[in-house]
Image (cartoon, rainbow, N blue to C red):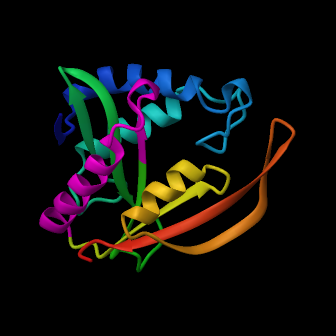
Amino acid sequence: MDIRLATSDDLPRFFVYLARQLKENGADDSVPFQPLSVAESRLNDEMRTRFTQGIDKSLQQSGWRRMLLAFDNEQLVGHIDIRPYQEAHTEHRVLLGMGVDKSCRGQGIGSQLLNSMFVWAALHTDCEVIDLWLLTENQSAYKLYQRHDFIQCAQINDMYRIDGRSFGYTMMSRRICS
């Protein structure tokens, strides 16, 4: 497994991977991993723009984003990214997003991506805390984050009504150097 920092040259391949992943969101009545309906679960221009603009910004600029990509025999099989909050006085915290290709889940790639991001963030940023939000019903993701010392900070029951189903939203946090 090769995990490395993404560059703008990686974005075309990343967007193909992300589009494929988003098509799986909530498909076949599975628990969604994004708060999007099945009809909305597609790569759109706004998503492309956030990644494209964020990856080229320095860590001192508003809207930066850093992403690590996991490759298995040159095939993109997972990603993890951090980005700053937009609110003032939150420079010590970042938001995390991640995903692993459906065909590769359960192989420890999520754990490798998390550990790699903890190391990268500790070495390259002044951030102290990583936060994330996930749909409460996504218990496999919840358990993964728990195993990596994320602590549940908040839960909002019935936050979303997606495709006629109710979903909660859970916030978890972890110190970068714990």
Q: Quadrant of the N terminus?
A: top left
The outermost residue toward the left is: 123
Res. 117 image quadrant: bottom left
- Indicate yes or no whether the magenta region holds residue 79: no
Tell me if residue 124 is in the magenta stretch.
yes
Taking depth in this image into account, of 175 and 60 the one nearest to the observer is 175
Please name the residue shown 26% across and 37% down the image: 69
Would you say 136 lies left or right of 2 here?
right
Toward which corner of the image does residue 18 lie, by quadrant? top left
- Image coordinates for residue 106, horizontal then vertical, percent: 41, 38
Residue depicted at x 48% and y 21% = 20
Q: Is residue 66 visible?
A: no
Chain part drawn in magenta? 98-125
Answer with left or right where residue 136 lies relative to residue 18.
Answer: right
Is residue 53 depicted above or below 115 in this figure? above
Q: Residue at x 71, y 28 (%)?
A: 38
Residue 67 locus on image (x, y percent): 28, 45
The secondary structure that most of the magenta stretch takes on is helix
Please state which of residues 49 and 174 is positioned toward the viewer in this rendering. 174
**Vertical relation: 94 (above or below) 16:** below
Q: Position of residue 119 (x, y in %)?
A: 17, 61
Would residue 135 be visible to someone looking at this image?
Answer: yes
On the picture, is 56 further left or further right than 141? left
Where residue 174 sits in the image (x, y, percent)? 38, 72
Which residue sits furthest bottom? 89
